[in-house]
Image (cartoon, rainbow, N blue to C red):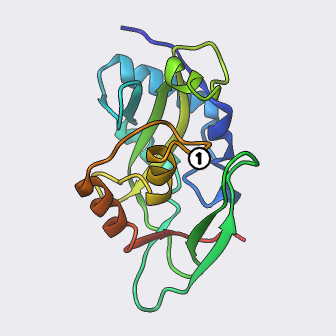
Amino acid sequence: MNERVAVNEFVRRQTKESGKSFSSQLSFEDIALHAEVQMSAGHFKEGYREGVRIVAAAVDITKQFTCPFVKIDAATELSAKYVQRRSDEKFYIQVRAKTGILLPAGKVELILYRHDVLAENDEQSTAAEWELISFHALPEGIDEMPMGPVTMMRNQLKLPGGTKANYSVAEWAHSVEFWQHYAALETE
């Protein structure tokens, strides 16, 4: 099973300045190719809906990614901004840590969407069967990072930029609980 993976334009926002996971050593095309190899070898799990896959990056490339998160404690200074990801999406409140030490990456998840799922909202960038739309460098010791509550809300309410989904009460609670302990370090 050799399924082609291409780069979706949305993932290109993941740069050093973004406050998101990034790699200074790998291009987006390198990451997509790695996702294709790993998926072909069966190193993936199904995501929150059919047509979404979470591909496990090989352990030996984990250190080529930067994890953008800090562990929140009483000394962490936080900031909140009213932002939007894209001009066609609603604004939301983004919380970032102004202080803290970046946590080392323990594993990397590569998020792929199948062409038909992206086509539901005309968000495909290529004709490939799968597209890399995001990647997450998880802090050491974290086995699974839940989707952020804002993303879940956008999906479940079918808002612009969301991909149709329904989440259980437990998934919502786990997401909110996790994000009470971790925040991306502000880059500005």
Viewer can see residue 141: no
Asked if residue 168 lies left or right of residue 77, the reply is left
- Location of residue 116 in the rendering, given as x and y in whole percent from the top left corner: 51, 18
For this view, does 136 lie left or right of residue 81? left
Residue placed under numbered mark 1 in the picture: 23
Left or right of 129 in this view: 14? right
Secondary structure of the residue carrying tag 1 is loop
Q: Position of residue 59 (x, y in %)?
A: 35, 41
Spot the residue most to the right: 87
Most distant residue in the front direction? 157
Residue 49 location in percent, x, y? 36, 32
Residue 95 shows up from this direction: yes
Q: Is residue 186 left or right of residue 101?
A: right
Q: Is residue 61 above or below residue 186?
A: above
| Furthest-left residue in this view | 170
| Towards the viewer: 5 or 26 | 5
| Few, some or many residues within 10 Å of mark 1 (<14, 14–19, 20+) | many
